Amino acid sequence: MEIKIGLLLPRSDMYPTLALDFMNGLRHSFNTFNSSDHTLKFLVEGVGTASDDGMVRLGEKMILQEDAALVVSFCSLFKLTDLVSPFNAYQKPLIHVNLGGNAIKKEHVSPNILYHSLNLWQSCYGAGMYAAKKFGKKGAIAASYYDGGYQHSQAFVQGFTDSGGEIVNYYVAPMDYKSENFEGMLQGIDESDPDVVFTLFSFNEGKKVLDVLAQSELNGKIPFVAIPTLTDESIMTENHDIKNMVSVASWTFQDEEEIMQNYISEIKETYHKPPTVMTLLGYEIGQVIAMTLNEHGHIPPAIANALEHKSVPSPRGLFTYNSYHETQIAQLKIRDFTFSDNGYKNIIVDTMDTSFMEDLYAKFEELPYAGWQNPYICT
């Protein structure tokens, strides 16, 4: 039986092959885990930065014109209420995909909507907790004008201060980072003398900041806690000689568990390149679809209710969907950013239980969304 799946996929300068990587992961996963007689027909639409009203029109088109059994979509949190509305009205299932730059609010919770993310903002909260315990109570934040506009910056601060820490310096880079020498960042860190520095940068700006930090007297003197997109191995391919940098995330491709290593081998063999975080997201969506069809024989309209608290296997470990219908994994990985002959790696040096994560939604409920219209990190 053929099942139509609508896919609203964005573009990203940081991940230029985002759509194809996501599709490859989805197809490979579904074909691996599907034991039913169902086949998938993909109805693909490009949605740019996933931040305008075209998202809503295309979502409704998938329901009314294409008769899609399920729609999978990236979307700005500022447009999420509008996107969700027709799916609730028509009682059709939607999976909203995101790296996890912003917290889901109560108004977004619906039996028809799954929120599938890599839990980035929750991981940043955990990183703040870890830093206060491991490195000390005085922290500085150095943030990009772009990457700092999401709630992972607030999550760093909240996790750190909730654990007894204090932010003693906050630097925000200018919009035109290409002409910035970051001397103000270095001076502010030096004068405030923190125990730890949180760094929120990515892609080309991240490369420049890593070089600046590595060439400064701070390198090796102060520990850096980075947002995981700064330490992405698929982006950071040259040795910046940065020392003592860690990140906290729900995944690492250096996980030695058999399920992750088998996954990487399969992706490399099939697509002749290692997986990215987008391949991983697509892979997990394929597992969710296969598991749902194997269990129900169709995609239930109330997909979130059907999957709530059920364990789904993933290369990053078993995950469930919590009471906010968002992915939650059992452990976060504390990862050391290390360069070797094979390039950068994020090596697990410790783990953190995630039992604190579900309580964070209430803590962030009253905080307004701020920053950019596009979902992190679609630009």
Image (cartoon, rainbow, N blue to C red):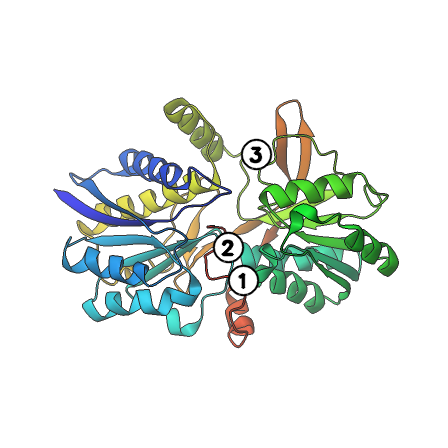
Q: Return the x and y of residue 301 as percentages of the image width and height.
A: 22, 61
> For the residue carrying disc 2, how many other residues have a C-alpha within 10 Å: few (<14), some (14-19), or many (20+)?
many
Q: Are circles 1 and 2 on residues that touch, CB within 8 Å?
A: yes
Foreground pick, 378 / 280: 378
- Residue drawn at x 26%, y 54% as measured from the top left: 71
- Residue drawn at x 54%, y 62% as measured from the top left: 357
Q: How far apart are marks 1 and 2 (CA)?
A: 9 Å
Of the image marks 1 and 3, the number of the one nearer the N terminus: 3
Q: Residue 254 carries which label?
A: 3
Q: Return the x and y of residue 224 as percentages of the image width and height.
A: 73, 48
Image-based side of 60 in relation to 253, left or right: left
> Which quadrant of the view contains residue 371?
bottom right
Foreground pick, 262 / 46: 46
Counting labels gives 3
Foreground pick, 136 / 221: 221
| Residue at the disc numbered 1 | 357
| Residue at the disc numbered 2 | 119
> Measured along the vertical axis of the image, is residue 306 above or below residue 215?
below
Question: Which residue is at the far left?
Answer: 1
Residue 354 visible from this viewpoint: no
Q: How far apart are marks 3 and 2 (CA)?
A: 18 Å
